[in-house]
Image: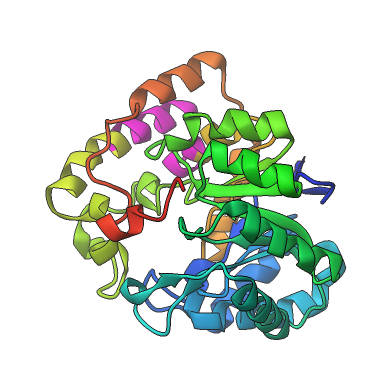
Amino acid sequence: MKSRNLGAGLGSVSAIGLGCMGMSEFYGPADRAQSLATLEYAFEKGVTFFDTADTYGLGRNENLLSSFLARHREQITLATKFGIKRDGPLADRRIDNTATYMASACEASLTRLGIETIDLYYAHRLNPGVPVEDTVGSMAELVKQGKVRGLGLSEVSPETLRRAHAIHPIAAVQSEYSLWTRDPEDGMLQTCKELGVAFVPYSPLGRGFLTGKIRSVDDMAVDDFRRTSQPRFQGDNLQKNLSVVDALTRFADSKGCTPAQLALAWVLAQGDHVIPIPGTRTERYIDENIGAGSLSLTAEDISALDNLAPKGAVSGERYTIEGMRHVDI
């Protein structure tokens, strides 16, 4: 697989990473053995960039990765996150960026992961009541202590990134980005490129919607969080949004690829500093995602895809009202 560079001297990683969240929570029942097999398969296929967070599965996702990391630590770049505190349901979460909590969260993640240093440590969400300069200043102390190699931010504005980068070099910004979530085009992609910061899109396949495999709510598990926390997957919104994936599927058929591969190739085409992290729990989708890396898109293809789902074409917000309060801070 081709490689791309993270910022702040963290070096190169596979051009397509693996988001591990769904292996522990959110998308219905997960099989631990299957997830471990998928991690190994991804590594065998050249994936070297793996993403988790302390809140995924309330720590279980980091625990899941520990045995895998023990076998391949020197070849893997591991990203995790802090800042979202919850003891149970997602709706009960709160944001904590204080230095005290950050230090304890970092220690807990290191213990669960079974490693001495976190390669890329993101502030998962920012508390608007805490200046980003204070948050990043405290994160920089973890770098000085050797517990973290590089710093990242998630779901922030271009202005916030500039303020943070002035305090300590930021290696990556992670935000949702796909054909049906185009917000980062309002300055973030350009700002990252200007500052030498990698941009890491999560949910580059629209939380699975752009695969074409979700046609109704019945195609999701009963405990799938998209049913309750993702307005785009609910009611009339879902039915209206099918027109986007239907058009994408027709385009993919003409290119001889799957809708998922076409959507992921479009994300990759947005710049060499863009490193998407699609999530999956099975080996066959690892192969499908990797295949997107060899798909060649012409300028005309990219323009046509841009017009397929322009901003405002998708029905429904990507989070609930409460969830949207903590993005673009």
- The quadrant of the image that shows the N terminus is top right
Q: Position of residue 322 (x, y in %)?
A: 29, 60
* x 68%, y 76%: residue: 103
Q: Residue at x 49, y 81 (%)?
A: 58
Above or below residue 303? Residue 167 is below
Q: Position of residue 222 (x, y in %)?
A: 25, 74
Would residue 230 be visible to someone looking at this image? no
Q: Residue at x 32, y 67 (%)?
A: 225
Q: How is the protein colored in the picture?
A: rainbow
Quadrant of the rendered structure where residue 63 is?
Answer: bottom right
Point out residue 304 in the picture as x, y percentages from the top left corner: 42, 19
Residue in front for this viewpoint, 117 or 258: 117
The residue under the point 51% across, 68% down is 21
Is 138 located above or below residue 36 in the figure? Answer: above
Q: Look at the image and give the residue range highlighted in magenta.
A: 246-263
- Left or right placement of residue 185 versus residue 9 in this view: left
Residue 250 in magenta?
yes
- Can residue 83 be seen here? The reply is yes
Along the line of sight, the residue nearer the viewer: 11 or 37: 11
The overriding secondary structure of the stretch rendered in magenta is helix
Q: Is residue 2 above or below residue 272?
A: below
From the viewer's side, name the closer residue of 98 and 238: 98
Residue farthest to the left, as pictured: 236
Name the side, left or right, on which 33 lies relative to 213: right
Q: Position of residue 226 (x, y in %)?
A: 30, 62
Number of dots carrying numbers: 0
Residue 186 is left or right of residue 99, and the answer is: left
